[in-house]
Structures are given as C-alpha cells and as structure tokens.
Image (spheres, rainbow, N blue to C red):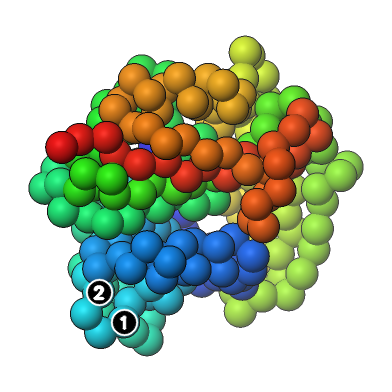
C-alpha cells in the first residue's frame, strides 16, 4: 500500500464528501449486524467514515491505515473516541484470532502488490476467529475502467474550503492488471498536488485462489451490493469469505 496517498490536509478534508456513505457502507454495516460482530477491524480505514459507523456499545472497532494524515483527520471527528486507531499497514494488525469481522473497502485491496498480497491476506486471516468473516470489494478488470481515466473524461472544477480546485486523472502505465495513474489537484495559486496511485486489477478467480491459499473458505462473490450474481459485466466484485481454522 502507498505510504501516505493523502499527505495534503486540504485534500483529506474533501475526502468524505467525495466518498460519501452509500450502498457500500450499508452492506458492510448490515453484515456486521447480521453476524453479531463484537469486534470489527477496518483495514485501510482512511478518514474513518465507515469505521465510526460500526461503533456501538458492546462492540470493539479498530481502524488501521498507513496514512498519518488521514488518521489524524479521523481522530478529530465526532465519535472517534469509540474507535482504536492504528497507524500502519497489515503488519500492524494483531493476529489475535479474535475479530469477528474484517472489512477492507474502496480500492484498498487493489493497492496491494503481487508480492505483498499473500502475507496481507495471511495477516487478515490471523486477525479473525475461526469462521470469522472477511469482506471486501475489487474492481472487475474485464470492464477496463482505467480507459476512462484521462484528462478529457475526468476533468472537473469546483469550489472547495481550500479554494477553487481543478482536478483530473491520467493513466501513465497499464501492464498485466497493474494500472498506474496520476491524480492532479490544481489549486488557485497554480500549485498542482499530484498523487500517483498503483492499482492491481485481479479476476474473481485469481482472488478466489489467493483467498484459499491464505486459509479462507466459504468464498462467496457477488456482482454488487445487493447480492447480484457476478458476471463479466459486473463493475466490481464483492467478496465474503470465512477464516478456516479450528
């Protein structure tokens, strides 16, 4: 995962508005309730919008993220005191085998490179109790979403608390599922905060194989947030799987 993809406080303040709660948050929150989760780990929690929503009496919630800037913002938000915030990547997750649910939302699992993927999955499996649930989403490579990540299709201007902002993204490299793109954020003074992101697009079968190798079973994959069947046309895959130990 990138060490700190949002190192500019001006952009972090905009993050929750740009990534507001929707069907994805509703899915994860309902899942936690459905399995009676008493301990939830949000891996790659970012600003903690969903993480804080998990919090309730009798439930322990842990948010883990490598971005000190995003976690700093998360810790200042209402309800933050109900969450334990952990700076770090998957190596910072304690393999206590006590969590009922681990979630990883947005593009978090796609940030993880090929060499890191097995040990990250192993860390997440180690955090879960036997039959504990791990759920996450990943974009379907067959849809080739990156073909729309260009200045013409993505250019946008808006007024923000940090002033007028011009934004666009531009892909710089595509190689066997590895997509590199630059996100440009030009402020009124002309400064361009450029953030380079690398995403790894994996097929549903590749992800299933990796999950099985990491000790997960009972793997379910859907094509959306409402249990839609996964298909070649699905924009994303939603995975739910269980730790097989005991």
Q: Is residue 123 visible?
A: no
Secondary structure beneath dot 2 equals loop
**Considering depth in this image, is 29 or 107 the residue closer to the camera?**
29
- Depicted 129 relative to depicted 23: above or below: above
Residue 69: image x %, image y %?
36, 60
Q: Which residue is mark 1?
A: 56
Residue 4: image x %, image y %?
38, 47
175 to the left or right of 86: right
Secondary structure beneath dot 1 equals loop
Quadrant for residue 3, please give it: top left
The quadrant in which the N terminus is found is top left
The residue at the point 61 percent across, 24 percent down is 203
51 to the left or right of 61: right
| Spatial separation of the CA atoms under disc 2 and disc 1 | 6 Å
The residue at the point 41 percent across, 70 percent down is 33
Residue 156: image x %, image y %?
80, 58
The quadrant in which the C terminus is found is top left
> Outermost residue toward the left?
96
- Depicted 214 relative to depicted 58: above or below: above
The residue at the point 72 percent across, 54 percent down is 167
The residue at the point 74 percent across, 33 percent down is 231
Q: Is residue 115 visible?
A: yes
How packed mark 2 is, by other alpha carbons closer than 10 Å (few <14, some 14-19, many 20 or more), is some
**Considering depth in this image, is 34 or 42 the residue closer to the camera?**
34
- Depicted 59 relative to depicted 32: above or below: below
Q: Which residue is mark 2?
A: 59
Marks 2 and 1 close (CB-CB < 8 Å)? yes
């Amino acid at each position: 995962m990138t060490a700190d993809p949002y190192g500019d406080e001006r952009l972090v303040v905009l993050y929750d508005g740009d990534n507001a709660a929707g069907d994805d948050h509703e899915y994860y929150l309902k899942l936690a309730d459905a399995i009676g989760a008493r301990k939830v780990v949000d891996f790659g929690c970012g600003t903690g919008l969903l993480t804080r929503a998990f919090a309730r009496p009798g439930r322990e919630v842990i948010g883990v993220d490598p971005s000190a800037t995003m976690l700093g913002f998360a810790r200042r938000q209402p309800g933050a005191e109900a969450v334990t915030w952990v700076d770090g990547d998957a190596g910072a997750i304690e393999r206590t085998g006590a969590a009922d649910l681990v979630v990883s939302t947005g593009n978090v699992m796609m940030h993880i490179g090929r060499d890191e993927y097995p040990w990250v999955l192993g860390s997440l499996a180690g955090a879960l109790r036997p039959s504990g649930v791990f759920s996450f989403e990943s974009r379907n490579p067959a849809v080739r979403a990156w073909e729309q990540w260009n200045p013409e299709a993505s250019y946008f201007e808006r007024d923000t608390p940090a002033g007028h902002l011009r934004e666009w993204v531009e892909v710089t490299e595509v190689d066997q599922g590895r997509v590199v793109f630059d996100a440009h954020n030009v402020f009124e003074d002309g400064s361009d905060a450029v953030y380079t992101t690398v995403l790894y697009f994996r097929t549903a079968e590749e992800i299933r194989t990796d999950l099985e190798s990491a000790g997960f079973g009972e793997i379910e994959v859907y094509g959306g947030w409402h249990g839609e069947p996964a298909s070649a046309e699905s924009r994303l895959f939603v995975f739910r799987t269980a730790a097989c130990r005991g």
